[in-house]
Image: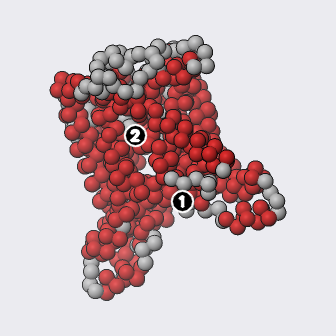
């Protein structure tokens, strides 16, 4: 088969998937970029001729909008707290499961992993009741230590930490699996050599495990960061963004502006700022990886 | 020995803590109204009742939402398996102009958050008359980049000699895909099927936007709506959560080997 025949055959195989991706993914991305420079609203939805280009006005308005900065701050808080914590929990669980002393690994792995596959909306509802100020399990647990009940989701100071805790519980199993795979790829003889030279467990962890896991860790931090910046369902179900917007996330802000108030031009500019933040975050982490190599 | 006991103790306790929300959910879903709102919390229903499930299916018509979720998850899975496997195979086993460019374009666009596409997609599907229909969910799910990569990764390991042999026997390109590649790729197809099924079943934001009638809602959207009306009915809401979660748990438990493999493969660096 020559190159020309091969190209024709390949494009026939690619056509369905690529046309779907171009029409329903790339085209909307480009359209969103254009819409973010217009005043697209509910009237435009009915009559496209009312559409006006307004330059970067949406972006200017965005940086004057205190609600946007609230959403930005909350989302960063969530990513910075939940990201590293969930990765640490994942690594801890992976190390435990990788220990040679442990049998029945699959049972423990299964119970750590179950939250990952379950429907986010459903478990967010369960956690809403777990955080219930009068009857919730969490308040029962802290009452055993004589701590007074806390209205977790009703106070501005505790609502976001409560969502962080729930998200760690929901997600750590996923990264745990990737860490286990990474740990199994570390050659056994490295540890043996270190043992012969009298290295302690901690020394081995610090100078073999951590460096050998670095590529895995970078991969995990990138996908975790991308996922966490898209925070939406947890606050939508548990707090509706409250109290006093203390859990309003960027995506929820975008959703409200776009699909509740139909300020679609404005909403598109929010989506692009989110995209930009995720892109910068990814580039920084990739740079970081290059530097450590 | 002591080390071992501590290790097992720790693993057991943390496993139980991880599962507690589900245990409470299951217990409360079998309680009468008001029985789950007690302090300290109880986990076992006494007396046991199915009244919450009856309310869900008879009065609140959740069976329609269950059907929507099931139908959409299966449809998206079948269509996307077909589209992704063809594209993944082409990327793995064909030489063609623009291959590198297309591949890198797809790879780098994986960081674009799907929320960016939602506004134009909504407008587009509205003009096409697809908002609030099953098509609104199926169309954007027809192909996905991660799926294409997963298939490609797997197909790279299939020896070229098998394909060449089939070609010498006179097989057409499509026959090779159908008769040689697909049977060999069954493990990765199962993996991808689980990802698609669960992804569609669990999805929330897009169905929330694209489906506007109670009778069209998927389970998560319906559940979220119910939550706003029944904030004070934990027993009913727990039954709703159980109904939503059970199918994905079953799929996962039966096929977990494939699912775990898929996660590990997805993390392989290029």
Q: Which chain is mark 1 on?
A: B
Q: Residue at x 67, y 47 (%)?
A: B3
Closest to the observer, A206 or B185: A206
Residue A118 bears which disc, if any? 2
Compared across the picture, whether B185 is left or right of A293 comes to left
Q: Residue at x 28, y 26 (%)?
A: B48
Compared across the picture, whether B101 is left or right of A193 comes to left
Q: Nearer the viewer, mark 1 or mark 2?
A: 2
Residues tagged by mark 1 and mark 2 found on one chain of the structure: no
Secondary-structure class at tag 1: loop
Q: Residue at x 34, y 38 (%)?
A: B245
Closest to the observer, A236 or B211: A236
The residue sitting at the front extreme is B1
Secondary-structure class at tag 2: loop
Query: Residue A284 is drawn in which quadrant?
Result: top right
Image position of A53 with respect to B184: above or below: above
Would you say residue B144 is visible in this rendering?
no
Query: Residue A181 is drawn in which quadrant?
Result: bottom right
Alpha carbon distance from label 1 to label 2: 24 Å
The answer to whether marks 1 and 2 mark residues whose Cβ atoms lie closer than 8 Å is no
Where is residue B250 drawn, in percent x and y? 33, 46
Closest to the observer, A156 or B164: A156
Q: Residue at x 39, y 62 (%)?
A: B188
Residue A103 bears which disc, if any? none
Image position of A29 with respect to A124: above or below: below
Residue B268 bears which disc, if any? 1
Where is residue A180 drawn, in percent x and y? 57, 54
Image position of A25 with respect to A63: above or below: below
The residue sitting at the bottom extreme is B168
Where is residue B58 drawn, in percent x and y? 17, 26
């Amino acid at each position: 088969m020559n190159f020309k025949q091969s190209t024709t055959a390949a494009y026939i195989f690619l056509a369905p998937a690529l046309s779907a991706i171009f029409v329903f993914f790339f085209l909307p991305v480009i359209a969103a970029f254009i819409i973010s420079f217009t005043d697209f609203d509910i009237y435009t939805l009915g009559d496209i001729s009312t559409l006006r280009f307004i330059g970067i006005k949406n972006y200017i308005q965005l940086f004057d909008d205190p609600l946007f900065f609230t959403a930005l701050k909350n989302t960063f808080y969530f990513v910075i707290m939940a990201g590293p914590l969930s990765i640490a929990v994942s690594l801890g669980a992976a190390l435990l499961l990788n220990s040679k002393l442990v049998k029945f690994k699959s049972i423990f792995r299964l119970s750590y992993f179950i939250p990952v596959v379950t429907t986010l909306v459903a478990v967010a509802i369960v956690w809403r009741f777990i955080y219930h100020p009068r009857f919730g399990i969490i308040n029962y647990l802290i009452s055993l230590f004589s701590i007074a009940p806390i209205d977790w989701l009703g106070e501005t100071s505790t609502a976001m930490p409560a969502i962080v805790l729930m998200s760690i519980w929901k997600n750590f199993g996923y990264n745990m699996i990737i860490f286990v795979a990474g740990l199994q790829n570390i050659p056994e003889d490295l540890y043996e050599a270190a043992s012969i030279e009298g290295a302690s467990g901690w020394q081995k962890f610090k100078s073999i495990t951590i460096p050998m896991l670095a590529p895995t860790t970078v991969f995990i931090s990138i996908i975790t960061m991308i996922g966490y910046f898209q925070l939406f369902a947890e606050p939508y179900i548990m707090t509706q963004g409250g109290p006093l917007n203390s859990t309003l996330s960027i995506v929820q802000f975008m959703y409200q502006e776009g699909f509740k108030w139909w300020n679609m031009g404005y909403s598109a500019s929010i989506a692009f700022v989110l995209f930009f933040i995720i892109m910068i975050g990814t580039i920084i982490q990739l740079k970081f990886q290059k530097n450590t190599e | 020995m002591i080390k071992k006991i501590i290790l097992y103790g720790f693993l057991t306790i943390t496993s139980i803590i991880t599962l507690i929300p589900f245990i409470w959910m299951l217990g409360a879903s079998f309680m009468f109204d008001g029985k789950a709102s007690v302090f300290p919390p109880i986990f076992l229903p006494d007396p046991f009742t199915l009244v919450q499930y009856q309310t869900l299916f008879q009065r609140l018509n959740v069976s329609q939402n269950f059907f929507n979720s099931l139908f959409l998850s299966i449809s998206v899975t079948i269509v996307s398996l077909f589209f992704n496997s063809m594209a993944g195979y082409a990327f793995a086993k064909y030489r063609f102009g623009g291959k590198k460019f297309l591949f890198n374009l797809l790879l780098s666009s994986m960081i674009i958050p799907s929320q960016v596409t939602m506004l134009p997609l909504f407008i587009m599907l509205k003009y096409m008359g697809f908002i609030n229909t099953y098509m609104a969910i199926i169309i954007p799910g027809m192909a996905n980049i991660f799926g294409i990569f997963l298939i490609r990764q797997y197909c790279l390991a299939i020896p070229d000699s098998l394909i060449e042999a089939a070609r010498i026997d006179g097989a057409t390109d499509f026959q090779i895909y159908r008769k040689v590649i697909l049977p060999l790729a069954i493990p990765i197809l199962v993996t991808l099927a689980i990802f698609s099924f669960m992804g569609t079943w669990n999805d929330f934001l897009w169905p929330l936007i694209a489906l506007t009638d109670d009778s069209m809602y998927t389970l998560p959207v319906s559940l979220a709506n119910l939550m706003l009306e029944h904030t004070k009915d934990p027993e009913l809401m727990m039954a709703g959560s159980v109904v939503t979660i059970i199918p994905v748990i079953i799929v996962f438990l039966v096929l977990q080997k494939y699912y775990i493999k898929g996660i590990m493969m997805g993390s392989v660096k290029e």
